[in-house]
Image (tube, rainbow, N blue to C red):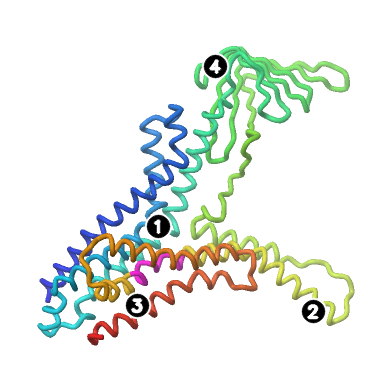
Amino acid sequence: MKTLHSYLTRQIIASLFMTVTVFTIVLLLGNVLKEISAFVISRQASIGVVAQALGLLIPFVWAFALPMGMLTATLLIFGRFSADQELTAVRASGISLLSLTSPVLLLSLALCGVSALVNLEIAPRCRVAYKSLFYKLRLELANVQLPEGRFIKAFPGYIFYVGKNDRTNLQEVMVFDLKNETTVKAPRGKISLDAPNKRIILELYQARSLSLRQGRAMPAFSEVWTLELNPKFERGSQTPQISEMTFSQLLAELHDLEQRMARPVPLPKLSSPELKARKLEWQKQRQDLTSPVRVQIHQQVAFSFACFGFTLVGIPLGIRVHRRETNVGIALALVLVVIYYSFVLLGKALDTRPEFVPHLIVWLPNFIFQAIGAVLLWRANRGG
């Protein structure tokens, strides 16, 4: 029995490694062609930057590639196991299907733990880091690093002129602050990108400024004069998007929103029915506000159990298909993946409609796949 379990587990792991690798490459190519290819063509991205971007994308695509790979591996191995009559030989030896597949089911549960770590923590952080790197490349591609020999008006309220720009080292810099009616001149300076906070930091050394205050000129001198800028084409904050938050960040965001909405609001003197109606309206607004965060929390957790549901469905379906061909297994896996993710997309589309309980909709594919898989596995175990 141990020998049979070891053989089947090795087959599943080998096929899992192959399928996850294939799906990872396919998903990476989709992102590369869509986002990175422009920088490669324009020679703005070096090989090192491309490698860094791909490394940050891998955990993000693993959130999708791992469940898809486990489903495909299960369909392929058990389809071939059935087609080669190995399953018939195992049953003739008095070994039940449940006993045979127990290590595969345990492996799927272990992968659920790996998926949870990726979905709840690693993938969101890597996605934020990737977007910061991508933002930096966009800044360089848009040439907002203060090109020399021209007036730059890309930043609202400021006009810049740079005599010479050697990468990030500037010479003969002039800054016109239109709002404060201030002119700053410096023999040298430096520009740097704060990608996580989506801003440009300009530092001028030995800067001399001249400001107009009530019709009088006010000169000043500063060893280091610092200015933070936000490009016009993209503004951002330090807070990541909800879809890019880790599980702990989502919980903190939900708690903060609930705390803010729980603060007492002064109400005029109302009758009891009016007061009750006002409280119900306040509760509805609170649900409307927190619903997107709640849906994202449930999606991350529910998505972590996809491997187990896919395995439960994949084992009996692979036996029923009874085919060795790889393309049949992959095609069937893609159909099941589309069905699964359609529920997730539906929940995301309704994340601002709490009356449809979208945070429970994202759990439906797990319940459906696990229930159907358990019934099919039970019937297959009985020889049905």
Callout 2, which amino acid?
Answer: Lys
- Residues at circles 4 and 1 in contact by the CB criterion of under 8 Å: no
Which comes before the other along the chain, label 4 or label 1? 1
Label 3, label 4: how many angstroms apart (C-alpha)? 64 Å
Of helix, strand and loop, which one carries label 3?
Answer: helix
Which mark is on residue 276? Answer: 2
Pointer 2 local density, CA inside 10 Å: few below 14, some 14–19, many at least 20: few
Q: Is disc 2 placed on a helix, strand or loop?
A: helix
Tag 4, which secondary structure?
strand
1 or 3: mark nearer the eye: 3
Which residue carries the number 4 mark? 165
Residue visible at 38% across and 39% down?
52
- Identity of the amino acid at label 4? Asn
Q: Amino acid at mark 1?
A: Ala
Between 337 and 280, which is closer to the camera in this rendering? 337
> Residues in magenta?
301-310
Using a 10 Å C-alpha cutoff, classify the residue at mark 1 as few (fewer than 14 neighbours), some (14 to 19) or many (20 or more): many
Task: Identify the residue position indicated by label 1 in the image.
Answer: 63
Q: Which residue is mark 3?
A: 373
Helix, strand or loop under label 1: helix
Q: Amino acid at mark 3?
A: Gly
